[in-house]
């Protein structure tokens, strides 16, 4: 890429972010326009689009599948039932509502993809918020942030976590032993901030009025079959890779979506057209566009050249590099989709470790696992930066984009600024806690 | 049909377009060459300074055997051997720089190995220089050959194949040694001159050139006769662009074929353009015909030879009789002269 193309790419990228941040343009339209300009100027070509599709196709399939299954479940009336149970558990207390969210979301997201969890929980969160007579946008933001943060609890909790963890040769158990505590601390760091960030909701006490009992589920067979599809999807997420023919989570989501649509078609509860029509394609398009934009930014070579610059600047001072990566990748992940950021940053980090002669050149080979213990905290720092940084803005993670789409579809407005009011203080605190954890890892190693 | 419904269907169509476009579109070939043309510049990764191979002269101009090969590739790709940006790299930095897309061609005394080609997924278009690993020791050292280095401290450059070769050679003979890893040959020579290492190991050609080029080395150091490994040094490119591999490979073959046919910088106009033999004319026809699928100017072969010279000229100018180093061609002679240089025909 020439200097002019690098400058144009960075300008286009900055303008897209600005348009979204200032709410001057719909985020999907802004993303599409940005990508169109880069294609028109020959900066993005089909090879880049293919590469973007390779990186992000899984995430898009996962979201599409999750949305179809959730939409199918909506037709069963199950969400109303769960919503009532959740509401009862809150006893009309905003504080209990928020803390229950933490307790429910964290374990779910330790195993399920974040955006899927947001999609599944959204109808319940919105129902409970309305019953407590509070704006549902705040709890939706919290659900997205909690789901992103809980992605650090296990190796399978978040695609970014998995990418980094597997790149440094970590097993599920090794992750639990060495990294999960850090994820738990980052998640726990949110709780003390909640009384301040969600003061109104935290203090609310709403007497729960005695309502008429919920309508009975009219088609129990359909409801049961839908739940089986959901359980099949979740089960395949967790155990799919151990099957004789391994099925990765995006594949599981597509299979589940197909079964859900088949069910809708056979039972004829409503037309398949209407289910497809209700899918949040706007969010999917924006996520696809953001992948292309990151592809263009990655193509500038700026990230890659940083790996060599880092050797000049910091030598083999791994603790310093880890802290800088935590902050830098965190910042970048706040405005870019974290999966491609992680993919590019991994290349940068491996390049740095080889160039600094911390590891041999064979470390650049896919599947290299013989990383020295001293390099593990650097990978962990990058992982925490990528996963937690996404909490800063509405475009930082797919769960956030999905949450914004759901808010919009339900008559709420989740703007860039509003998300940041919650996101920035949380990310600042989480990154500070993570920095201490990473330094602790260095100290122990 | 209301506006909302239309908008929704537009969104669906756009999403589907994104999803299928990548799958249906053919991959673009020759991306490296396209980028080089767009930039008007070849980015070539070289050493930070190995005499005879890649070093800056007093005026700040790059010169050397590897440098001239970069210029030959630039002459083929862009028609002008001057359109090269040299990126100096430490040995450990070379593969991150190549794989990270910071250079288009790596010309940094790199040994062609299975691990690098299969593991790192880079390609070696052909062998440019047949080398081996040797040793340099202080001139007053009692060391006569590698056997006398048992129990000694040996310096070697980080991120090279030299550490493995040394370990294999010494352990096979039950010899012990300790090693000190340094960033460059220059650092290694300083360590030997200061007595912190009893020997420096590396490519024989580089050691020989350093021996003459590094201040104080000629008076205080000498080379041992041993050669403990094969070091086929080659240009390196990323493995995902077959067309670029082909172009670099055939520039190398052109240089060798030109020497074999006696075509030099001075006589290329006469022997190739004005009065070619039937064999040369056929080769030139092939170069012209296949220039188009290679994406380069039709007169690329003439331009390369006219601007850079043939293999022998490049060798002599930088390492051989016309250089301060006066190295033997050795294995780098043409096959007709008992060497290993043998290029496929340009037909």
Image (cartoon, grey):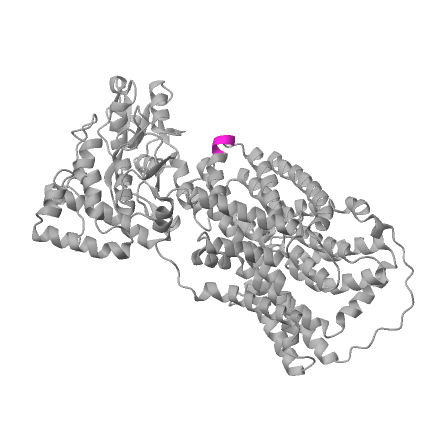
Q: Nearer the viewer, residue B224 or A279?
A: A279
- Residue A407 at x, y percent in the picture: 72, 60
Please tell me how many numbered marks the rendered image carries.
Answer: 0
- Residue A224 at x, y percent in the picture: 71, 76
Q: Nearer the viewer, residue B87 or B98?
A: B87
* Image point (30%, 19%), residue name: B215
- Residue A334 at x, y percent in the picture: 62, 47
In the depicted structure, whether residue B245 falls above or below residue A64: above
Quadrant of the rendered image containing residue A88: bottom right
Is A70 situated left or right of A363 in this image? right
Indicate the quadrant containing the C terminus of chain A: top left, top right, bottom left or bottom right.
top right
In the depicted structure, whether residue A41 falls above or below residue B154: below
Is A80 situated left or right of A35 in this image? right
- Residue A393 at x, y percent in the picture: 66, 49
In the depicted structure, whether residue B49 falls above or below residue B18: above
Q: Is residue A238 in sight in this rendering?
A: no
Magenta part of the chain: A311-315
In the depicted structure, whether residue B106 falls above or below residue B223: below
Q: Nearer the viewer, residue A410 or B193?
A: A410
Q: Is residue A29 in sight in this rendering?
A: yes
Q: Nearer the viewer, residue B34 or B45?
A: B34
Does the segment drawn in magenta span residue A150? no
Is A394 situated left or right of A320 in this image? right
* Image point (73%, 48%), residue name: A422
Is B336 situated left or right of B123 in this image? left
Q: Is the magenta region chiefly helix, strand or loop?
A: helix
Quadrant of the rendered image containing residue B187: top left
């Amino acid at each position: 890429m020439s200097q002019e193309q690098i400058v144009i790419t960075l300008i286009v990228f900055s303008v897209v972010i600005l348009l979204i941040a200032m709410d001057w343009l719909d985020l999907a339209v802004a993303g599409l326009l940005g990508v169109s300009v880069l294609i028109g100027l020959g900066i993005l070509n089909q090879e880049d689009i293919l590469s973007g599709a390779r990186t992000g196709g899984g995430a898009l399939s996962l979201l599409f599948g999750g949305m179809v299954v959730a939409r199918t479940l909506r037709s069963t009336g199950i969400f109303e039932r769960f919503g009532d149970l959740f509401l009862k558990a809150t006893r009309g207390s905003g504080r209990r509502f928020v803390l229950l969210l933490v307790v429910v979301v964290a374990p779910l997201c330790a195993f399920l993809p974040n955006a899927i969890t947001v999609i599944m929980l959204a109808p319940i969160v919105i129902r409970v918020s309305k019953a407590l007579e509070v704006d549902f946008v705040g709890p939706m933001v919290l659900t997205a942030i909690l789901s992103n943060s809980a992605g650090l609890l296990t190796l399978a909790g978040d695609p970014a976590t998995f990418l980094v963890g597997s790149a440094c040769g970590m097993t599920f158990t090794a992750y639990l032993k060495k990294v999960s505590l850090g994820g738990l601390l980052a998640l726990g760091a949110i709780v003390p901030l909640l009384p301040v960030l969600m003061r109104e909701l935290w203090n609310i006490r709403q007497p729960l009025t005695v309502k008429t009992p919920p309508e009975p589920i009219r088609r129990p067979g359909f409801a049961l079959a839908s739940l089986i599809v959901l359980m099949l999807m979740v089960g395949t997420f967790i155990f799919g890779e151990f099957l004789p023919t391994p099925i990765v989570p995006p594949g599981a989501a597509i299979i589940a979506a197909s079964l859900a649509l088949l069910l809708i078609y056979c039972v004829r509860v409503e037309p398949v057209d209407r289910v497809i029509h209700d899918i949040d394609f706007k969010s999917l398009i924006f996520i696809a566009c953001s992948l292309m934009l990151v592809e263009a930014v990655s193509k500038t070579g700026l990230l890659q050249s940083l790996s060599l610059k880092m050797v000049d600047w910091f030598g083999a001072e791994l603790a310093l590099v880890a802290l800088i990566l935590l902050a830098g990748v965190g910042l970048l992940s706040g405005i870019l989709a974290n999966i491609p950021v992680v993919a590019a940053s991994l290349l940068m980090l491996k390049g740095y470790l080889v160039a600094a002669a911390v590891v041999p050149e064979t470390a650049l080979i896919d599947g290299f696992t013989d990383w020295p213990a001293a390099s593990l905290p650097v990978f962990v720092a990058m992982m925490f930066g990528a996963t937690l940084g996404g909490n800063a803005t509405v475009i930082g993670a797919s769960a956030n984009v999905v949450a914004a789409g759901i808010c919009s579809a339900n008559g709420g407005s989740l703007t860039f600024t509003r998300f940041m009011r919650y996101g920035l203080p949380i990310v600042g605190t989480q990154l500070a806690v993570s920095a201490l954890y990473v330094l602790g890892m260095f100290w122990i190693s | 049909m209301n506006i909302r419904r239309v908008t929704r269907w537009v969104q669906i169509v756009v999403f589907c377009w994104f999803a299928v476009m990548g799958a249906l579109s053919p991959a673009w070939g020759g991306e490296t060459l396209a980028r080089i043309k767009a930039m008007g510049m070849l980015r070539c990764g070289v050493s930070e300074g190995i005499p005879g191979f890649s070093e800056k002269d007093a005026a700040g101009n790059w010169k050397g055997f590897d440098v001239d090969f970069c210029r030959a590739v630039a002459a083929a790709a862009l028609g002008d051997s001057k359109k090269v940006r040299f990126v100096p790299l430490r040995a450990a930095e070379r593969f991150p720089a190549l794989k990270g897309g910071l250079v288009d061609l790596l010309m940094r005394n790199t040994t062609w190995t299975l691990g690098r080609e299969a593991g790192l997924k880079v390609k070696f278009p052909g062998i440019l220089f047949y080398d081996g690993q040797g040793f340099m020791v202080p001139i007053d050292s009692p060391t006569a050959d590698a056997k006398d280095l048992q129990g000694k401290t040996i310096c070697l450059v980080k991120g090279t194949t030299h550490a493995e070769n040394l370990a294999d050679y010494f352990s096979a003979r039950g010899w012990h040694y300790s090693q000190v890893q340094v960033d460059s040959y220059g650092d290694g020579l300083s360590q030997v001159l200061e007595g912190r290492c009893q020997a420096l190991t590396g490519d024989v050609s580089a050691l020989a050139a350093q021996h003459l080029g590094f201040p104080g080395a000629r008076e205080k150091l000498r080379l041992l006769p041993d050669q403990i490994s094969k070091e086929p040094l080659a240009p390196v490119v990323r493995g995902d662009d077959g067309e670029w591999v082909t172009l670099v490979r055939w520039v190398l073959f052109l240089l060798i074929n030109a020497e074999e046919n006696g075509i030099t910088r001075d006589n290329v106009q006469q022997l190739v353009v004005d009065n070619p033999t039937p064999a040369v004319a056929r080769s030139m026809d092939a170069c012209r015909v296949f220039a188009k699928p290679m994406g380069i100017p039709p007169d690329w072969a003439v331009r390369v030879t006219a601007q850079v010279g043939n293999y022998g000229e490049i060798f002599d100018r930088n390492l051989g009789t016309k250089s301060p180093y006066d190295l033997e061609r050795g294995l780098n002679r043409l096959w007709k002269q008992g060497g290993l240089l043998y290029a496929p025909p340009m037909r």
